[in-house]
Image (cartoon, rainbow, N blue to C red):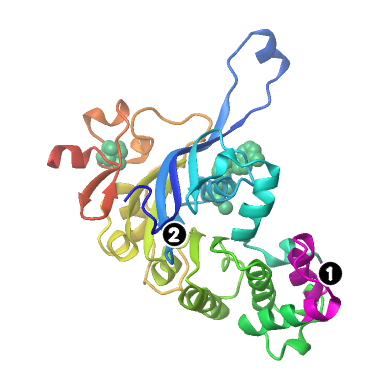
Amino acid sequence: MSGSSDVILDVVNLKKWFPLRRGLREIVGRKPRKYVKAVDGISFQIKKGEIFALAGESGCGKSTTGRTVLRLLEPTDGTVRFMGKDIMSLDQNGIKSFLRRKAQIIFQDPYESLSPRMTVEDIIGEPLEVHRLVNSKEERKEIVSRYLEEVGLTPAKDFIFRYPHELSGGQRQRVAVARALVLEPEFIVADEPVSMLDMSIRASILNLLLDLREKRGLSFLFITHDLSVAKYIADRLAIMYLGKIVELGKATDVIDNPQHPYTKALISAVPVPDPRHKIGEIPIKGEVPSPINIPPGCRFHPRCLYAFEPCDKEEPELREVEPGHFVACHLYDQAR
Ligand SMILES: Nc1ncnc2c1ncn2[C@@H]1O[C@H](COP(=O)(O)OP(=O)(O)O)[C@@H](O)[C@H]1O
Ligand code: SF4
Ligand SMILES: [Mg+2]
């Protein structure tokens, strides 16, 4: 599959380590620098028109992954090819003219991501101005109106002059989606786009994204900590734990037939596969360790109920255990 033209995003061994600030004692003592290993060597591909979800508990590295593949953060290591181009080799010009046009991001909290002093027209029209794609105010207004209608804010004239505080949470997120669409991107990173919304309107925003995929053939990296949301929207799903992917496959396979002990624990915490239900407590012993001191071997071993002899020494590789379903766990080394 590698490099084939139906792949829009190809991520290989991506790492993002944040250096920790060193105190005087560490500097004088020449102690090695420590890092927060937020993303610690992950590989995955997203196909054209696919919704690929990344799930896992808070702090496992989902947002850092989403930002690094768009070069909103600079990677520590690894390669990312987007629409066939190595985006790591792009200069600032290439980032602006290619990456910032073809790929967009939607954040969890539209109230934070939308400027409170700008009208809906200015918010959605701004990317058109930045990329010099409009010649007149009238043209800009016409384009903005078209996108408002497309995201379900109709009639557009009722919304175009409003400020973010004059909109509901769901309407604000629709404005954020319109802003992401206005440059006609191929790919969107959606970072927990419904987590802040009331349960009652989550499904309508998820359905809007599903419609956009259908109509425009858009591809998504969809980040969520909520497996019921992932099951509702995603084609394929990767589960992250402490900066690594531990399981990856068709969303229905991973959720209905989880193989990794961590995924099993996560799933058992979801009462019903319904986007209106929220994830509960996770029945695993202990806390998530710090990404500064990642346990050796399998990074899940101190919390794993199945840990055995190799687990604290050898890091398990992601292996295909059934067609298209990958798991990183020594239990599956033995079965093979
Ligand atoms: N700019 C940063 N500097 C230092 N550490 C960071 C930074 N951004 C994120 N982290 C750390 O990286 C880890 C992963 O964070 P994040 O990607 O936001 O996780 P998630 O989105 O899965 O909740 C966390 O331990 C977080 O504290
Ligand atoms: S490799 Fe070992 S410790 Fe890690 S998940 Fe599998 S059984 Fe548990
Ligand atoms: Mg996050």
Horizontal and vertical percent position of residue 152: 62, 84
In the picture, measured across the screen, residue 141 lies left or right of residue 168, that is right
- Would you say residue 134 sits in the magenta stretch? yes
Residue, disc 1: 118
Residue 104 in sight here: no
Q: Quadrant of residue 136?
A: bottom right
Horizontal and vertical percent position of residue 216: 51, 74
Residue, disc 2: 53
The residue lying at 36 percent from left, 40 percent from top is 303
- Would you say residue 97 sits in the magenta stretch? no
The three-letter code of the residue at mark 2 reads Ala
Q: Nearer the viewer, residue 221 or 298?
A: 221
Q: Main secondary structure of the magenta part?
A: helix
Q: Quadrant of ligand 1?
A: top right
Q: Which residues are magenta?
A: 116-141
Confirm or reject: label 2 Cβ below 8 Å from ligand 1: no
Q: Quadrant of residue 279?
A: bottom left
The three-letter code of the residue at mark 1 reads Met
Horizontal and vertical percent position of residue 148: 68, 81
Up the image or down, 260 lies above or below 75; here it is below
The residue lying at 37 percent from left, 39 percent from top is 300
Per the image, label 2 sits on a secondary structure element best described as: strand
In the picture, measured across the screen, residue 66 lies left or right of residue 8, that is right
Residue 45 in sight here: yes
